[in-house]
Image: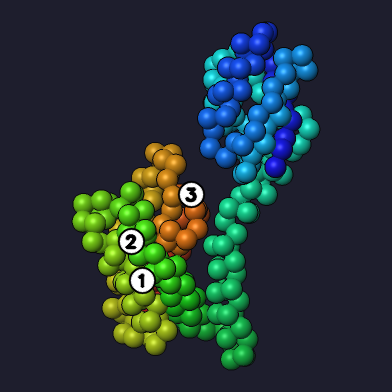
Amino acid sequence: MTHTYQLTGMTCSGCENSVKSALYKLTNVTGVEVSRETNTATITMSKHISISDLQNAIGAESKYKISATQHSEVAEQTKSWLETYKPILLIFFYITAVASLVQFVNHRFDTTQWMNIFMAGFFLTFSFFKMLDLKGFAESYAMYDVVAKRIPVWGYLYAFIELSLGIAYTINFNPLITNVVTVVVMSISIIGVLQSVLNKQKIQCACLGAVFNLPMSTVTIIEDALMIVMAAVSLILLN
């Protein structure tokens, strides 16, 4: 995609070269043309880059100021977000649809059964993508998980634990043990995710293994928290 921005503050060819060089250093930027005569910067990028990131690249407190005048930043950021998280959104949609269809066929809504089917689908699907490149997943996971950082083999074990949980929810194996394990494992996992997001670390999320390049974000927190909440609710309903 290519966008033309208003760029003020350039007074000479040196300014043009400085801004151009700074923008080229950004990941996903494939082309840059700047003009002090028209006060514009035309940037070609493989993925939408926010105005704040562009401004930081040329200096947050510098004399150069960049702004979007020919497109809607909100629309572009929404489009970019949907494109980035399309795989995980589709997975959640399919799993939710299957869990709901089972309830429709049964002519009644069973909360526990719905959550069991959803969690079975979640763990089986996510473990599948991790298994496609187990080594790649373990290496990515060790970048932020509190246990995998200290015990690298945990990254390998984690994929098999997810697979086991998926099978356990599918066959309704000992709900008490299955849900307790889910709460413990996912609670440990979410700690590293929270630390990475709060520290604004730009690293790859390993939730779908090394197959998709998903950034660590609040989506990852929601994903882990959802499993914890569902398992906790299931434990409460058991009593």
List the residue tagged with mark 3.
215
The three-letter code of the residue at mark 2 reads Lys
Q: How crowded is mark 1: few (under 14 residues within 10 Å), some or many (20 or more)?
A: many
C-alpha gap between disc 3 and disc 2:
19 Å
Residue at the disc numbered 2 = 135
Task: Examine the rendering and report whether any part of residue 67 can be seen.
Answer: no
User: Is 58 displayed left or right of 169 in the figure?
Assistant: right
Q: Nearer the viewer, residue 126 or 93?
A: 126
Residue contact at pointers 1 and 3, CB within 8 angstroms:
no
For the residues labelled 1 and 3, the Cα–Cα distance comes to 21 Å
Which-is-in-front pick, marks 1 and 2? 2
* Disc 1/disc 2 C-alpha distance (Å): 16 Å
| Residue 174, image quadrant | bottom left
Q: Residue 128 carries which label?
A: none
Amino acid tagged 3: Pro
The residue at which mark 1 appears reads as 162
Q: Is residue 89 above or below residue 45?
A: below
